[in-house]
Image (cartoon, grey):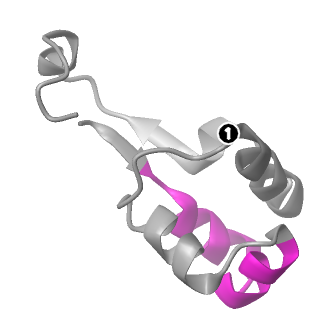
Amino acid sequence: MAVRVTLDALIVAKGIKARDLAAQVGLSETQLSLFRSGKVKGIRFRTLAKLCAALECRPGDLLDYDFDAADLLGDEEE
């Protein structure tokens, strides 16, 4: 899948520690780390909204997408 989590770059740009962000948003450091690494299958909109509020950003600032025609073929991996 060509969706990438770009949260690390935003954390660096904002000068915030991941530990502090996790606490502010109400996530464990492990949960935040899994999201940062792209190892989660989904994220609740409420959690996404909390991240955006804490970082003063938009959802598109946390995620990126590189077009891949294979994404249109089906859900074989899911």
* Horizontal and vertical percent position of residue 70: 12, 19
Position of 64 relative to 55 (above/below): above
Indicate the amino acid at tag 1: Pro
**10 part of magenta stretch:** yes
Q: On the image, which quarter does residue 39 sit in?
A: bottom left
* Horizontal and vertical percent position of residue 13: 67, 70
The residue that disc 1 covers is 59
Position of 51 relative to 33 (above/below): above
**23 part of magenta stretch:** yes
Name the residue located 73 percent from the left edge and 52 percent from the top edge.
47
Q: On the image, which quarter does residue 68 sit in?
A: top left
Name the residue located 53 percent from the left edge and 69 percent from the top edge.
8
* Horizontal and vertical percent position of residue 46: 79, 44
Q: On the image, which quarter does residue 59 sit in?
A: top right
What secondary structure is found at the residue carrying circle 1?
A: helix
| Position of residue 35 in the picture relative to residue 49 (left or right) | left
How many numbered discs sit on the rendered protein?
1
The N terminus lies in quadrant: top left
Tell me, yes or no, if residue 57 can be seen here: no
The magenta stretch spans which residues? 5-24
Position of 23 relative to 64 (above/below): below
Name the residue located 27 percent from the left edge and 36 percent from the top edge.
2
Residue furthest top as drawn: 72
| Position of residue 60 in the picture relative to residue 53 (left or right) | left
Tell me, yes or no, if residue 10 can be seen here: yes
The C terminus lies in quadrant: top left
Name the residue located 39 percent from the left edge and 67 percent from the top edge.
37
Q: Nearer the viewer, residue 55 or 24?
A: 24
Label 1 CA crowd tier, 10 Å (few <14, some 14–19, many 20+): some
Position of 28 relative to 54 (above/below): below
| Magenta highlight: main SS | helix
